[in-house]
């Protein structure tokens, strides 16, 4: 695994990559786990992820191309939710209920919320683009201010 702390307009992000792709993004600066050897592939994925995140925060990137280690998405409904979420375009939002429907269970809005809370790749798999049915922001792992800033970066302003 390769790990870096990226300074962004929403604070530090800890970015972790492995040979299979992006493993996680967490808000805050966390020390890297002890690792004897970092593969060249993990380093390349990490460099690409950090570069793409820098471009996103600079306003020059609207989608991500970095490989994602989808094995971290568990399976079943949670995995379907995260895969559907990855398709929500820059500058658009989707409600928890709508995302539940896209993932195959329109009555599972609460389960979508749970999937958002445990999303290993915030920003890249854009859980900040999921809002309440009435259009209000809703919760976010980085906090509501960070969610609002990310949406504003994408040209959206929503009620708190």
Image: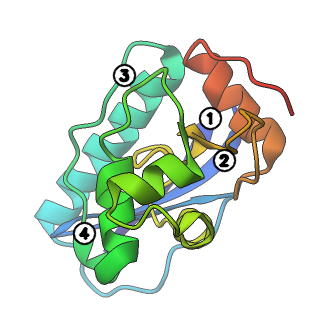
- Res 23 visible: no
Q: Could you tell me which quadrant the C terminus lies in?
A: top right
What residue do we see at 58% from left, 63% from top? 109
Q: Which of marks 1 and 3 is nearer the N terminus?
A: 1
How far apart in space, not on screen, are marks 1 and 2 (Cα)?
6 Å
**Front-most of residues 55 and 151:** 151
For the residues labelled 1 and 2, say whether their Cβ atoms are less than 8 Å apart. yes
Kindly identify which residue carries mark 3: 62
Could you classify mark 2 by the number of other residues whose Cα lies within 10 Å: few (under 14), some (14-19), or many (20 or more)? some
Query: By what rule are the colours in the image chosen?
Result: rainbow
What residue do we see at 79% from left, 50% from top? 143
Q: Could you say which quadrant of the image residue 48 lies in?
A: top left
User: Residue 88: horizontal and vertical position, in percent?
Assistant: 38, 36
In this rendering, which labeled residue sits more in front, label 2 or label 3?
3
**In the rendered view, would you say 41 is above or below 126?**
below
**73 lies left or right of 156:** left
In this rendering, which labeled residue sits more in front, label 4 or label 1?
4
Kindly identify which residue carries mark 1: 8
User: Residue 131: horizontal and vertical position, in percent?
Assistant: 65, 42
Please tell me whether mark 1 sits on a helix, a strand or a loop.
Answer: strand
User: Residue 21: horizontal and vertical position, in percent?
Assistant: 22, 62
Kindly identify which residue carries mark 4: 70
User: Residue 76: horizontal and vertical position, in percent?
Assistant: 30, 81
**Front-most of residues 40 and 27:** 27
Mark carried by residue 12: 2
For the residues labelled 1 and 3, say whether their Cβ atoms are less than 8 Å apart. no
**Front-most of residues 127 and 25:** 127
Q: Could you say which quadrant of the image residue 134 lies in?
A: top right
Could you classify mark 4 by the number of other residues whose Cα lies within 10 Å: few (under 14), some (14-19), or many (20 or more)? some
């Amino acid at each position: 695994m390769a790990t870096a702390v990226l300074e962004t307009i929403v604070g530090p992000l800890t970015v972790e990559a492995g040979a299979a792709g992006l493993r996680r993004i967490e808000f805050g600066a966390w020390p890297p786990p002890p690792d004897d050897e970092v593969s060249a592939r993990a380093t390349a994925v990490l460099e690409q992820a950090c570069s793409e995140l820098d471009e996103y925060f600079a306003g020059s990137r609207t989608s991500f191309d970095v490989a994602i280690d989808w094995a971290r998405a568990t399976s079943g409904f949670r995995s379907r939710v995260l895969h559907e979420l990855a398709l929500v375009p820059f500058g658009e939002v989707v409600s928890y209920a709508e995302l539940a429907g896209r993932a195959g269970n329109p009555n599972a809005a609460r389960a979508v919320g749970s999937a958002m809370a445990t999303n290993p790749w915030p920003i890249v798999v854009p859980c900040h683009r999921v809002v309440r049915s009435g259009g209000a922001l809703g919760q976010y792992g980085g906090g509501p201010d960070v969610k609002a800033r990310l949406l504003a970066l994408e040209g959206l302003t929503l009620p708190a």
